[in-house]
Each structure stands twice: as structure tokens, then as C-alpha cells.
Image: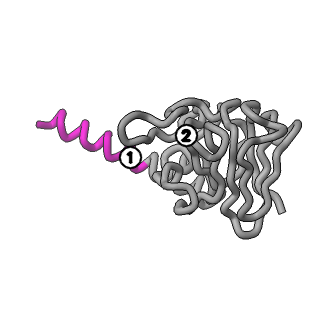
Amino acid sequence: MRLLGRATALTAMAAALFVTNAGAASAANPGNDADTLQSMEACKEPGYSKFKFTLWYNSGQNGAYRNMHHAIYNFDALRPGDGADHPLKYCSGGVSSPWPGSLQRVKNNAAAGENFHYKYMARVYYNSGYKGSQDVMGPYQHIDQFRNVYNNNASFQFTS
């Protein structure tokens, strides 16, 4: 009984530490990597998510997608606070079978995008760190097939 009590206490402490650290990160940066990796908003139907930018696996906004809401320096190295890099992956979906691209890495796998933000430009870059060629979408604009970063995309940011 005493051992079970200690295990429960340790579990509660670990949970409190995670919530405290996640809360601190959220206060400093409302769009943090933990939120991007773990939020249900990331996989809500595009246009209905609080996240205002979507990448699609296939051209024509088809296949698997992933919603985003803040700048991502490197699609393969999101840092949710656990000390490790995590790749951004497409959401899993489809009624009878998974959509093409489900659970695949987003980096170098995006063919189309849409900006649902009312104010900011959305930029998808060829390289990590917001560098290299880019495709740009104005507010409420989409690109059915990227011209400059088709299946070669590594970072994203909103700009004014």
C-alpha cells in the first residue's frame, strides 16, 4: 500500500511538472511546439481549426493534411519540452482506408497549402530556418500545387 502511494505521488508530481512547464512555455509563446504536436486543432478539418495554415500531402488539397498556427523553424525538429526533436507528421484519416500521406513526415512531403488567416501572409520555405525558395499565400489564399517548394519544404511562418 505504501509503495502504491509513492508511485501515485510520483506520477502526480511528474504530471504537475509537465503542466507547469507547458504552461510557462505557453505564456512566453502562445504557439509552442508542444501545442503544435499535441493539440487536437492540428487535425481538425481545415478551415474549421483554430490553426490558420494547412499543408496537404497531395496537390489540389487532397490526401492527408496538417494544420499549423505558428512559425516552425524545421518540420523535422519540433521541441515540445522533453529535450528531443520530433518530426511534424500528417494527420491520420480516411473512412475506409487511410488518406495518402497519413502519418508521413511533413518535411519534403507537401504539395499544396492554404492560408486561412485574415491578416498575415503564409510562407513555406525550401530550407529549414525560413531560408531558400518559398511559396507565398496571401490571406484566404491557397495554392493547389506548390511551384517553388513542391515536395521540398522544411519550414513555415506567417509574415506581415
| Labels 2, 1: front one | 2
> Relative to residue 87, is residue 118 depicted above or below?
below
Question: Given the image, on which type of amino acid does mark 1 rest?
Answer: Ala
Earlier along the polypeptide chain: callout 2 or callout 1?
Answer: 1
Q: Residue 15: which disc?
A: 1
Work out which residue is located at the far front of the displayed protein and give it. 60
Category of crowding for the residue at label 2, using alpha-carbon neighbours closer than 10 angstroms: few (below 14), some (14–19), many (at least 20) = many
Q: Looking at the picture, how far across and down is residue 23, in whole percent?
A: 52, 56
Q: Looking at the picture, how far across and down is residue 42, in whole percent?
A: 53, 50
Q: Residue 63: which disc?
A: 2
Q: Main secondary structure of the magenta part?
A: helix
Check disc 2 and report its element: helix, strand or loop.
Answer: strand
Q: Looking at the picture, how far across and down is residue 24, in whole percent?
A: 57, 55
Asked if residue 53 lies in the magenta stretch, the reply is no
Question: Given the image, on which type of amino acid does mark 2 rest?
Answer: Gly
Work out which residue is located at the far right of the displayed protein and give it. 132
Q: Which residues are magenta?
A: 1-16
